[in-house]
Amino acid sequence: MSRAALLVLADGRFPAGGHAHSGGAEAAVKDGRIRDARGLEAFCRGRLHTTGLTAAGLAAAAALGHDFAALDAAADARTPSPALRAVARKLGRQMMRAARAAWPGADLDALAVAFPRGTHQPIVLGTAARAAGLAPPDAAHCVAYETVSGPATAAVRLLSLDPFEATAVLARLAPEMDSVAAMAASAALEGIDALPAASAPLLDITAEQHATWPVRLFAS
């Protein structure tokens, strides 16, 4: 198992399109729910323990080799917002291209054939982790990290937030990322029906609103 592969997969420069998405932070900034580092931390904490936990479970299950079709259905059921389902599949397609170039193998090829229009990004990420020789907890950690790092990076651009403050937010959340990843990986061992289904209704609502904005800095 290569922990260096985990760094590659979690690197914000991995060409999977995540830089174009704010994870709901753009709408939260407009609504005044994120004004500073304190607001960013509260937003990221809420996202981590809801949609982050759910996505981490899906990634860990994919890294375990669970059935692709069942995982895709589980992801759809856990993503009530049509806008977020579309985003998840778009990011899945983008990650698939990068992952197949980095770690070519039968599992990623099979997933691409099964879902030519793309499946949810955490499923692709978990399958990529498996192809890279990583364990399910590694896939869950990667998702937990990107769940908060995406909004943190976006907040720097949206608010001209001091990047040192944004990084400090991520550092303070590190123990909670570990906890969420552990919970997700543990649930994945019990099967697809046991995967977390934590939700964040406000993120779903604002995602639908954000998708209709005529002018926006981020895709979601």
Image (cartoon, rainbow, N blue to C red):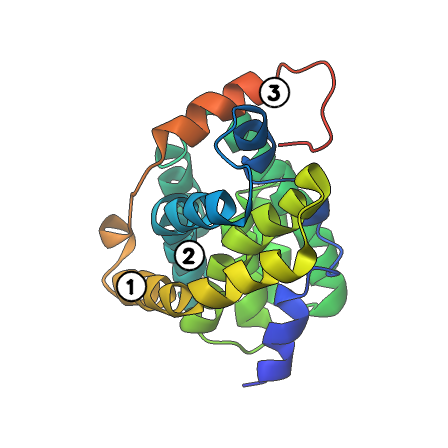
The residue that mark 1 highlights is 183
Report whether residue 142 is seen: no
Q: Amino acid at mark 3?
A: Ala
Where residue 56 is drawn, which disc sits there? 2
Location of residue 125 in the rendering, given as x and y in whole percent from the top left corner:
56, 58
Viewer-side residue, 209 vs 82:
209
The residue that mark 3 highlights is 211
Horizontal side of residue 193 vs 86, given as left or right: left
Q: In the figure, 78 relative to 149: above or below? A: above
Viewer-side residue, 158 vs 206:
158
Location of residue 107 in the rendering, given as x and y in whole percent from the top left corner:
57, 63
Q: CA distance from mark 2 to mark 3?
A: 24 Å
- Name the image quarter holding residue 77: top left
Residue at the image point whose x is 34% and y is 50% from the top: 49
Label 3, residues with CA under 10 Å away: few <14, some 14-19, many ≥20 = some
Q: CA distance from mark 1 to mark 2?
A: 9 Å
Q: In the figure, 11 relative to 114: above or below? A: below
Q: CA distance from mark 1 to mark 3?
A: 31 Å
Task: Say which element carries label 1.
Answer: helix
Nearer the viewer's eye, disc 2 or disc 3? 3
Location of residue 63 in the rendering, given as x and y in whole percent from the top left corner:
46, 65
- Which one is earlier in the sequence, the residue at label 2 or at label 3? 2
Classify the position of the C terminus by image quarter: top right
Horizontal side of residue 42 vs 179, given as left or right: right
Q: In the figure, 56 relative to 27: above or below? A: below
Task: Say which element carries label 2.
Answer: helix
Viewer-side residue, 19 vs 169:
169
Location of residue 176 in the rendering, given as x and y in whole percent from the top left corner:
36, 64
Residue at the image point whose x is 55% and y is 42% from the top: 119
Residue at the image point whose x is 67% and y is 39% from the top: 159
Q: Amino acid at mark 1?
A: Met
Report whether residue 104 is seen: yes
